[in-house]
Amino acid sequence: MNKQWVSNVLETLSTIGRTQSGGSSRLAFSAADLEARRYFTGLMKEAGLAVREDAFGNIIGRLEGTDSAAPAIGTGSHIDTVPEGGHFDGMVGSTASLAALMRLKERGPLRHPLELIIFQMEESSRFSLSTFGSKVMVGTADLDVARGQKDKEGLSLPEAMNHAGYDFEKLPGAIRHKGELAAFVEMHIEQSANLDEAGIPVGLVTAIAAPIRSHVVIEGKASHSGGTPMNNRKDALVCAADLVLAIRAVGNRFAKKEIVTTVGNLVVSPGAMNVVPGKVELWLDLRGTDRAVMDEAEAAVEKAAEGISAVHGLPIKFRRLVTDTPVRMTPRILEVLEESCRALELPVMRLVSGAGHDTMNVARIADVGMIFIRNKDGLSHHPEEHADIDDIMAGLDLLTETLYRLAK
Ligand code: CO
């Protein structure tokens, strides 16, 4: 598949769920997401793949090999987006994976079957559940937590799935086991500027950092902003402000150990100009590449919260939503990727992924590797997110060669 074909597919995807800002909003199970999925499924069928969907809506396209007993070699990514998302995060890998399979089909059958997997709900924006499709697939999804998650409109995940034609109760049927997939290689834009700064088109991921995410509730007392004296307030937002600063301080303290901490959303109740805030909900996102260090950093946040709670006299409650363990890529796959780079005369650069990807879950049942594509200024989850088509094509060559070597 040539540059024009790849550009056209990316261009078409970019028009689905297009927003005023020039971005795309395709939250999982939304109308725009379903439209993009229909479009992409059509491309997969046109390419001659046998296409099926599992109970969660992960799209699986398969090309048989010459050995029907051999485990499959997989590739793929996702096509859902954050609100006002860009046109490359997920789409580059999905499109290149399909293009790679089409190229390999032309070359003639390989020993192993090939699979293209488009994971559903990679982005956590709608239900605060990240890389959920791949978790469902490998059996690590916490279905009890997921059942109660709601979007901003108050719609639960089971309800949203139902509206889109899926049944939450059937999710256990989507589980796949070790031995079905021998290897999985995902291509993705970098979402950091390491490749851009080094002037290198593609990179080989060695490890994926993982998030711990918690929902935090601070209970104060709502009261009249005019009638409540300063010394007699239970202002949950002032308490939250201290907590946000403490969370940043922990991130700074652990920065050398590859920890980053973020509070990206705060809900203030009742949220009126003339009412002392009675309750604040906030979400902690803590990421690292070493689970023990992440636990240490999280404990430091909770310790700081205890102190802040005591100073303000307000309870602060943490509820863990997500615990992902950082994942190392499989050495054997990294070697094949590196050999393929050499064969294609591409420079070799190894790097860590700060963002989570479906590959970290697939690692539970298969050997894994990831290819990163240079991302201008590392800008992602933004309408102006950009990857150059020539870099994407270099990544496609590398992906094709790697899959060929793994599947032949
Ligand atoms: Co992505």
Image (spheres, helix red, strand yellow):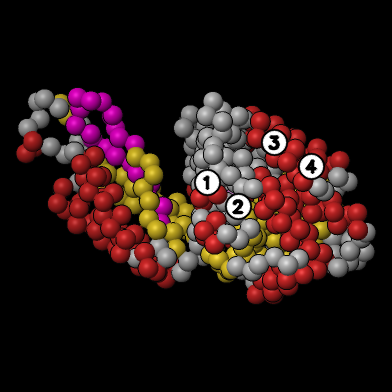
Is disc 2 in contact with disc 1, using a CB cutoff of under 8 Å?
yes
Q: Is residue 26 visible?
A: yes
Number of residues whose C-alpha sits closer than 10 Å to that of mark 2, classed few (under 14), some (14–19) or many (20 or more): many
Front position in the image: 180 or 131 = 131
Spatial CA distance of label 3 from label 2 is 16 Å
Spatial CA distance of label 4 from label 2 is 19 Å
Residue kind at label 2, given as amino acid type: Ile
Q: Quadrant of residue 320?
A: bottom left
Residue to which mark 3 is pinned? 11
Name the secondary structure under disc 3.
helix
Can you tell which mark lies on residue 331?
none
Above or below: residue 28 compared with residue 74: above
Spatial CA distance of label 1 from label 4 is 23 Å
Residue to which mark 1 is pinned? 380
Residue to which mark 4 is pinned? 5
Q: Is residue 398 left or right of residue 322?
A: right
**Marked residue nearer the N-terminal end (3 or 2):** 3
Based on the picture, tell me whether residue 285 belongs to the magenta stretch: yes
In the image, the residue with mark 3 has its CB under 8 Å from the nearest atom of ligand 1? no
Q: Quadrant of residue 190?
A: bottom right
Residue to which mark 2 is pinned? 189
Is disc 1 in contact with disc 3, using a CB cutoff of under 8 Å?
no
Report the residue that reaches farthest toward the front: 199
Q: Which residues are magenta?
A: 267-286
Question: Who's the residue at 50% across and 62% down the image?
Answer: 209
